[in-house]
Amino acid sequence: MTAERPQPAGQVLVASNRGPVSYTRAGADGALTARRGGGGLVSGLSALGPDAGTWVCAALSDDDRAAAAAHGGRLPAADTGGQSVRMLDISPETFDAAYNGVANSVLWFVHHLLYQTPLEPVFDERFEARWARYRAYNRAFADALAEEAAEGAVVLVQDYHLSLVPGLLAKRRPDLRIGHFSHTPWAPPDLFRVLPDEMARELLLGILGADRAAFLTARWARAFTECCAALLGAEVTAPGPAGDGSVTHQGRTTRIGVHGLGADAEFLRERASRADVAERAAELRERVGPGRATIVRVDRTELSKNIVRGLLAFRRLLVDRPEWHGRVTHLAFAYPSRQDLAIYREYTAEVSRVAEAINTEFGRADWTPVVLHVKDDFARSLAAYRMADVALVNPIRDGMNLVAKEIPVVSERGAALVLSREAGAAEELGADALLVNPYDIAGTAEALHQALTLDGPSRTARAERLTARATALPPTAWFLAQLRALRPA
Amino acid sequence: MTAERPQPAGQVLVASNRGPVSYTRAGADGALTARRGGGGLVSGLSALGPDAGTWVCAALSDDDRAAAAAHGGRLPAADTGGQSVRMLDISPETFDAAYNGVANSVLWFVHHLLYQTPLEPVFDERFEARWARYRAYNRAFADALAEEAAEGAVVLVQDYHLSLVPGLLAKRRPDLRIGHFSHTPWAPPDLFRVLPDEMARELLLGILGADRAAFLTARWARAFTECCAALLGAEVTAPGPAGDGSVTHQGRTTRIGVHGLGADAEFLRERASRADVAERAAELRERVGPGRATIVRVDRTELSKNIVRGLLAFRRLLVDRPEWHGRVTHLAFAYPSRQDLAIYREYTAEVSRVAEAINTEFGRADWTPVVLHVKDDFARSLAAYRMADVALVNPIRDGMNLVAKEIPVVSERGAALVLSREAGAAEELGADALLVNPYDIAGTAEALHQALTLDGPSRTARAERLTARATALPPTAWFLAQLRALRPA
C-alpha cells in the first residue's frame, strides 16, 4: 500500500466509538495496561504518517475511563504507538444508553430487519431517556472534534453510533470536510419508518451533515437515498455500483459513495502461518478425521448471522444426500455475543440444541457431523479457514461480512463459498460464489452439495477470482480512498 | 348503486376462498342449515342480476363439505338466494395446509412484516409439503373455473389464497379475461425475498397470469411492481394514485390497478339504528359514565393491529396529560383471532395484561380508564362506533382497514380519526385524519390529545370529509369498477 501514500495535505481526524487502544488492569499491582487493536482505520490512519492524524474515541470500560482521566483524555504515545488519540471519558450511564440502548439495539435491529414488529420496538419514556443520552454522546464527539480539528481538516466519522456527529460538527465548523461511513446495511424505507419520526429525521439529517456519506455496497447506499427521499422529501440521485450518488436537502448536497472494504491478505496469511495455528489445525484434523471434507463457518452468535438455519441446511444436506454421511464434517464456530440480552442467550442455546440434535440423528462412533465451538479462539478460526473445503456464510442481512472474504484468502483447499445474497459481500463475490437465499434451507443444502462437488479446475478458478476480488480494496486502500474522495478536486 | 348496473355482457365468475354461504348442523335432527354472508363481492355479484355470475369457493368446514358433497358441488338456489355457487370439496388436509400453513401464516406474515426473521420462517420439509398442497388447492380452483367459465367470461380471483390461479387458468383458457385482487398490503422486495426463490417466482407469475392485478392502494400496487422488477427482472411502469401501471414479463403485459374499497354506508346506518344496538349503547354509556369522552377501537386481535401499543399510547396520554384523568374512557374491543397459534394467544394475553395494568395504575372507584371487551359482538361494536369521540386505528400495516372508514360513517359525535400512516386507508383519509407512526407511542398519545380537543367546527368539517371519502367507493361500486376495467374498451 505504500504506493498509495496520500498527499500530505492537512490533518485527518477519525471518530469512532471504539478506538485503537483499550486498557485493562494487569499484574499484581493492577496497573493500567494498554492493548492496541487492528483493522482498517488503524492501518489507514497510521499510513498517513506519525503527525497527520488524530483519533477521537470513547472510553469503553472503567479501565479506559481511568486511563483517559489519568491523561486528561489525550493518551500517551507509548500506549498508542505514536498515534494521537483523544479518548472521551463519557459517563457509564450515557455510554450504556447510547451504545446498548440505542445504537446496538434499535439501530442495529432496524438496519438488519431483526424486530418482531408486533411487539418490538416499544418507544416509551425509558427509550426517550436513552435517546437523549445518544444525543449527548454524539455531542461529546462533536465537541471534541471541533476542538481538535485544524482549519480545513478532514474528519472521517464512523458508523451508526455517531450518526448525529456530522450534522452537529458541520454547524460549528463549516470549514471542515466531513465524511461519514456506515458499516452496516441500511433499512428499506418501510422498515426505517419504524423509528419515531423526529428521531428518524435527526438520524438522516445528522448523516447528511457530512459532505460525503459512504457505504459498503451500492445496495445499502441506495436504501439510504430511498429513506432520504421517502422521509425527508429530499432530491436524490441513486448511486451506481461505484457510488456517485447524491442527496440534496434544504439547499445542501451530500455526495454518496461506496467503498467495499476488503480482506487484509498480508496480515491474514502471515498470522495463519504461525505455529499456534498449525497446532490448532492438527487438532481439528484429528477431530474431523482423515479424508473428510469440511464445511466451515465462523461467526459471532449474532441474530443476523443465521447460524440456526445454517445448521438446518447442513442437516438437510444429510437428509437429501445420504452419500455424504461420514464424508463431511461441519465446523461451526459460533462465538457468544451480547449475552446480556435474553434473545441472544436463547439464540445461542438454540444453536447448541440444533447442533446436538443433528449429531444425535446422524452421528456414528467414528463420525461427528457437527463440531461446534463456542469459545472464541482466533488461531483456531484461522486453522479452520485453512482447512475449509466449503465456507458457509449465510447471514439474513449483513453490511459486508469479512469472513466471506477472509476464508478464500487463507484456505489451502481452494474453498468454495456458499454465500447469502443478503450479505454485502455478495455484490462483489456473487459471480464466483454459490449464492443462496438465507431463508431457504433446501436451497442452501443444495448449494452446499454443489460446493462440495465442484470439480478441481472450476474450484481453483473460482477460488482465484474470489481471492482477487476479496482483496481488491484492502483496509489501508479503503481508508485512503475515502480520504481522496473528500479532498477538493 | 342501481345506476351503476353494468352492461350485461357475458358471464362473470368470482373465485375466493370463502364463499357467500356457509353451513352448520342445526336443530335436533342436525340438518345442514345454510347461512348467507355479506360483503362487497356478494353485493357486487348480485347487482349483476340472477343469471350473470357464478361463485367458486372452498368448503371451509366438515359441514360445508357435507353440503357440497350432497349437491355435487353446486349449491341449491334455496341456500344461496339464487346465486350460482360451486363449492369445492377440498380435503381437510389440503385445505388446512394451504389456508393455514401457507396463506395465513407465511404470506400474511410476509406482507404485514410480522416475522421475527432470525428465527422465522423456517422452510423445511414440512413446509414444502404444505406448499405442495397450496398448489393443489389453487389447481382445484383453476380446474373448476376452467369448467364453469363460458367463452370469453370474466373471472375475478380474490387474494393471496389464490395467487397461482390466474397463471394456471390463463394457460388453459386464454379466451378468459382474468383479474386478481389483493386485499392485503404487499411486502417490499427486501422482505418478499424471504420466500424461497421458486415459491416467490411462482406467486408473482401466478398473479401476472391475470390481465389485470389490482390492489387496495397505490402503495401496495407499487410494492408489487417493485417485487416484479427485483425478483423477475420484469419491465414495470409504477402505478400512480389511481393505478394505471403495468408489468411486462416474458412478452406478456399485466395491467396494474387500484380500487380503494369503501364503507357500505347504507348497510351500516340501517344496522346501527336497530334496537339491539341502542340497547348496547345504553349499557356502554352506563359503563363509561355520563359526560366522559370515548376513544374507540374495534379489531380482531391480530398481530398487525397493534393493540398493545394502542393501549400504551392511551396510558401515555394519561401520563403526559393528567387533565384527562376521569374525563376519557378507552373502549377497546379486541376480538380473539387465530387462537390455535401460540403467538396469537400470547398477544391476546398481553392485551389483557396491559389493559389491567393501566386500570390498576390510574383507575378510580368512579372511573375505569380502559373498558376491554374480548367477546365478538357486532351490535356492541356498532354501539361503540355511534358513541365514538375519537376512533383509534393504529395498525403496524394493513391492506385498508375498514374500521377507519366505518366509524366516521356511524359516529353520532363527529368522531376524530387517529389513523396509522401504515394503513391503506391513510392514502384516502390522511388529509382529514390525525396520522400517526404506529410505533411511536408518544406521538400517538399526542394525536389522541389533539383528537379529543379538536374544536367543534373543525371536528365537524373533518368528520364530513372523512365520511365522504370513506364512502366514495362502496362495495358494489368497487366490484363493478373492477369488472369495467377488465372489459375490452
Image: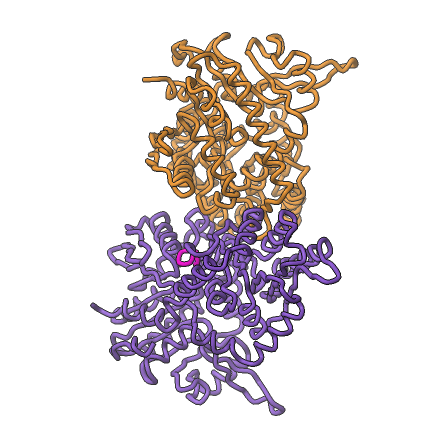
Chain colours: A orange, B purple
Q: Residue furthest bottom?
A: B29
Nearest the eye: A80 or A404: A80
Residue B283 in view of the camera = yes
Location of residue B31 (image quadrant): bottom right
Residue under the point 74% across and 13% down: A31
Residue B341 in view of the camera = no
Location of residue A460 (image quadrant): top left
Nearest the eye: B473 or B73: B473
Nearest the eye: A18 or B67: A18
Residue stretch in magenta: B425-429
Residue A17 x, y percent position in the rendering: 57, 25
B111 on left or right of A294: left
Residue B113 x, y percent position in the rendering: 50, 52
A125 on left or right of A175: right
Residue B123 x, y percent position in the rendering: 52, 54
Residue B286 x, y percent position in the rendering: 66, 70
B52 on left or right of B414: left
**Figure quadrant of the N terminus of chain A:** top left
Query: Is A22 one of the magenta-colored residues?
Result: no
The answer to whether B330 is drawn above or below residue B271 in the figure is above
* Count of numbered tags: 0
The answer to whether B211 is drawn above or below residue B143 in the figure is above
Location of residue B240 (image quadrant): bottom left
Residue under the point 34% across and 85% down: B50
Nearest the eye: B289 or B22: B289
Q: Residue furthest left?
A: B489
